[in-house]
């Protein structure tokens, strides 16, 4: 009936995402010098990017829940809601970019396009 019941699983997912990002960063920064650096193609584009687009899209598809989120806010107003949305999307976007960057830098062209 309300989204408050999801607070623990939401916190767990945030911690899990942060852990994955931290482990990828650690792996790249501490172990990349022990292994041969894989080929990294920074400027190249591939048609495989279109297979990754749906995955990124699904990550940010919670917009249909926005009225429910707004309804459940205490002392709700548009400015407060906009700030909450900005913080949430900034965090998610930062984690996605961080995982993509460190994953690609660590594994190079061996990285699948939909990771």
Image: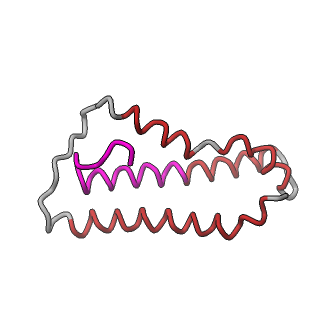
Within the magenta stretch, is there residue 106? yes
Q: Residue at x 66, y 45 (%)?
A: 62
Answer left or right for 38 relative to 63.
left
Answer left or right for 107 relative to 84.
left
Q: Nearer the viewer, residue 66 or 52?
A: 52
Q: Residue at x 16, y 47 (%)?
A: 39
- In the image, residue 54 lies at what x, y percent? 49, 37
Answer left or right for 102 relative to 15.
left
Q: Nearer the viewer, residue 92 or 113?
A: 113
- In the image, residue 85 lies at what x, y percent? 68, 48
Within the magenta stretch, is there residue 112? yes
Q: Residue at x 24, y 40 (%)?
A: 42
| Most frequent secondary structure within the magenta stretch | helix
Count of numbered labels shown in the rendering: 0
Answer left or right for 103 relative to 9.
left
The residue segment tinted magenta is 92-115
């Amino acid at each position: 009936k309300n989204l408050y019941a999801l607070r623990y699983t939401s916190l767990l997912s945030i911690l899990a995402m942060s852990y994955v990002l931290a482990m990828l960063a650690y792996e790249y920064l501490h172990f990349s010098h022990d292994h041969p650096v894989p080929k990294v193609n920074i400027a190249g584009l591939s048609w495989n990017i279109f297979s990754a687009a749906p995955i990124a899209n699904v990550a940010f598809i919670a917009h249909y829940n926005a009225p429910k989120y707004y309804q459940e806010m205490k002392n709700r107003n548009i400015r407060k809601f906009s700030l909450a949305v900005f913080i949430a999307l900034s965090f998610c976007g930062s984690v996605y970019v961080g995982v993509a960057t460190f994953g690609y830098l660590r594994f190079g062209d061996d990285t699948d396009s939909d990771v």
